[in-house]
Amino acid sequence: MADGVKPRVKAPKKAAAGEVVTLKTLISHKMESGQRKDKQGNKIPRSIINRFTCDFNGANVIDATLEAAISTNPYIEFEAVVNESGEFKFTWYDDDGSVYEDSKSIKVG
């Protein structure tokens, strides 16, 4: 598990049925492309968040593959339609096998 990794999510707490809501995520992660070298000339191993997913009540909303060009502390913003109350589950996958999760509930009504 990488040091100092912290996922953050901003999502509305309530919405009307059928409303489009904006979800914003940010994960603190240094990201290393695998292209740089250290002071001794050794290649620094790649270490990035390589995948991001979001599910709502078990149904996939977004599944993104991230590549080496992704920025440090990647910010992802997207929209989803909510027809019922439930929970968004956000998951980030790291090259080292670590998985970081967060969730937010939303009430429709």
Image (cartoon, grey):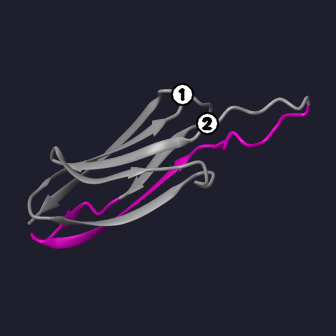
Q: Which residue is mark 2?
A: 47
Q: Amino acid at mark 1?
A: Asp
Which quarter of the rendering shows the N terminus? top right
Instruction: Name above or below for residue 16 compared with residue 52.
Output: below
Instruction: Name above or below for residue 62 compared with residue 96.
Output: below
Residue 48 painted magenta: no
Instruction: Name above or below for residue 67 compared with residue 80.
Output: above
Q: Element at badge 1?
A: loop
Q: Element at badge 2?
A: loop
Q: How many marks?
A: 2
Q: Residue at x 67, y 42 (%)?
A: 32
Snapshot quadrant of residue 70: bottom right
* Whether label 1 touches label 2, CB < 8 Å: yes
Which quarter of the rendering shows the C terminus? bottom left
Tell me: 95 left or right of 56.
right
Tell me: 89 left or right of 64.
left
Disc 1: CA contacts within 10 A as few (<14), some (14-19) or many (>=20)? few
Residue 13 painted magenta: yes
Instruction: List x then y, in percent, for residue 57.
Output: 15, 47
Instruction: List x then y, in percent, for residue 37.
Output: 82, 37
Instruction: List x then y, in percent, for residue 54.
Output: 30, 50
Q: Amino acid at mark 2?
A: Ser
Q: Nearer the viewer, residue 71 or 18?
A: 71
- C-alpha gap between disc 1 and disc 2: 7 Å
Q: Residue at x 20, y 64 (%)?
A: 14
Task: Residue lying at the far right in this picture: please name it.
Answer: 40
Tell me: 8 left or right of 84.
right
Query: Counting residues from the N terminus, which is met first, the one under dot 1 or under dot 2?
Result: 2
Q: Residue at x 91, y 33 (%)?
A: 39
Q: Which residue is mark 1?
A: 96
Instruction: List x then y, in percent, for residue 68.
Output: 60, 48
What is the span of residues highlighted in magenta in the rendered image? Answer: 11-39
